[in-house]
Image (cartoon, coloured by chain):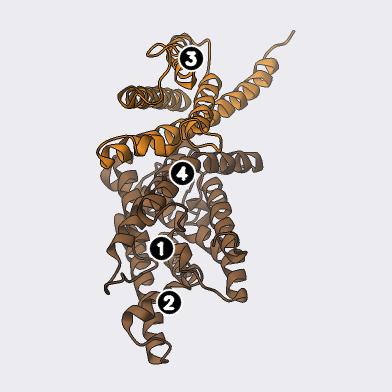
Amino acid sequence: MTATSPPPGAGQPAVRPRPGSAVTTGGVGGAVVVVGARVGLWLGVQLGLAGLLILTGVADTAGQALDEAAGWWMVYGALVDLGTLGVIIWLLGRDGRSYRGLLGPPTTAWQLALGAAGVLAATVPAVVFSGELTSAIYGQDAIAPMFAVVDLPPWASVLSVLVVPLVAELAEPVAYLGVVLPRLERRLGRSWLAAAIVVALWAAEHALYPLLTSPGGGLDWGFAAYRVGSVLPFLAAWTAAYYALGRRLLPIMVARWVLNAGTAAALALGLIA
Amino acid sequence: MASSVEGSTQNRVLYRLTWLALVLSLGHHLDHLIRGNAVGWPVTDEVNAFTYSLVVYPIIATGLVLYHTGRVGPGFWALVSGGGAVFVAAVHFGPAAVEPPELIVDHYDRPILGWLVFGWLVAFVTVLAVTCLYETRLWAQQRRAGRAARPAAGAGNTR
């Protein structure tokens, strides 16, 4: 169903490849590379930053350094997404495809507006579920820990509102829905199974950021599990919406940008405190 | 030929989504009956949101018959799914919710059961909203195809 076709040129077969074929989606190895790169980048960036904090004497222990670094996750997330974009572009170059092709069929302005509004509406149950889960685990009216730990100077807050959400939309949904999903579908032959795996992988990735320590020392695995559980309905809704919209990614990217930039703005303005 | 295959696939998906929403709706009404804290007529004498929500079953049954005979299209289902999503979300999630999530989660002896039925409700509203998106897309597609077919039919008419 992807709307891509190989560039015309000498040596190209005259018959247009079947949508979803290896020529249009690439192999499952590319999916492993993309997911592996994101996991490696999240761990690498956080551990690297924590190491830097210890070396410069800002933090004394590894746990303290990780917690200090966590305050910046809404900024250094851009490094992970830029790295992901680099991997996607490398894969596209290798397979002779375009970035636009990953975004699905052409989307008119009204399709984009209506689709994004629909995706936002479909996200409401996930927002409610996530809020209930936060209240159940961290107490009534508690702020989710990943937002409570954010501690940024004004210039970094501006970056987290204006730049980071934009880079995230160009990389994250494109990686999972534009690159990983079609490759898994082709490999497994079952869209529902591929979609379930993508949602599970995408949710599991959220356990990696920010890395927080528990009061008793060591990583806070309870928080990691909460992260996965709270984000799961969002990812399931967006993946379902991706299919419902005829594999158009742009409305999902716009809706996610509204949510993520809105959350970053609310944090920067002190509306979530 | 290709569009007829696409059309039958779209029909199959639409039917499957309708049946899925129906099963999720039945499960949610069953949860109401088990909890017993938010029920109305015909279980009690009070006519409330529970009572009004039961109208969805005759609507779905009528819709299935009319859709099968070609009297209604995806637009009908988009309105049913969208209306259902708004109604259930307003009753359970809205600022003036008559049955907020706490009434579900905290009402079961075992918390895991409360979370299970709450998760079911979240899945139900999400499926309704996503189904509405899908049906709206089909509706728009059908209207575009209809508009494109009209001038073509007109061009062949020499009168």
Give the x, y percent position of residue B98: 50, 30
Q: For the residue marked with disc 1, what is the amino acid?
A: Leu
The kind of residue tagged 3 is Val
Furthest toward the right, the residue is: B159
Colour seen for chain B: orange
The residue labelled by disc 3 is B47
Residues at circles 3 and 1 in contact by the CB criterion of under 8 Å: no
- Residue shown at 37% from the left, 23% from the top: B29
**Mark 3, mark 1: which one is toward the viewer?**
3
Badge 2: chain ID: A
> In the rendered image, which residue does mark 2 sit on?
A69
Say which mark, if any, is on residue A91: 1
CA separation in Å, label 2 and label 3: 56 Å
Work out whether residue B94 or residue A199 is closer to the camera in this orientation and state it: B94
Tag 4 and tag 1 share a subunit:
yes
Q: In the figure, the brown chain has which letter?
A: A
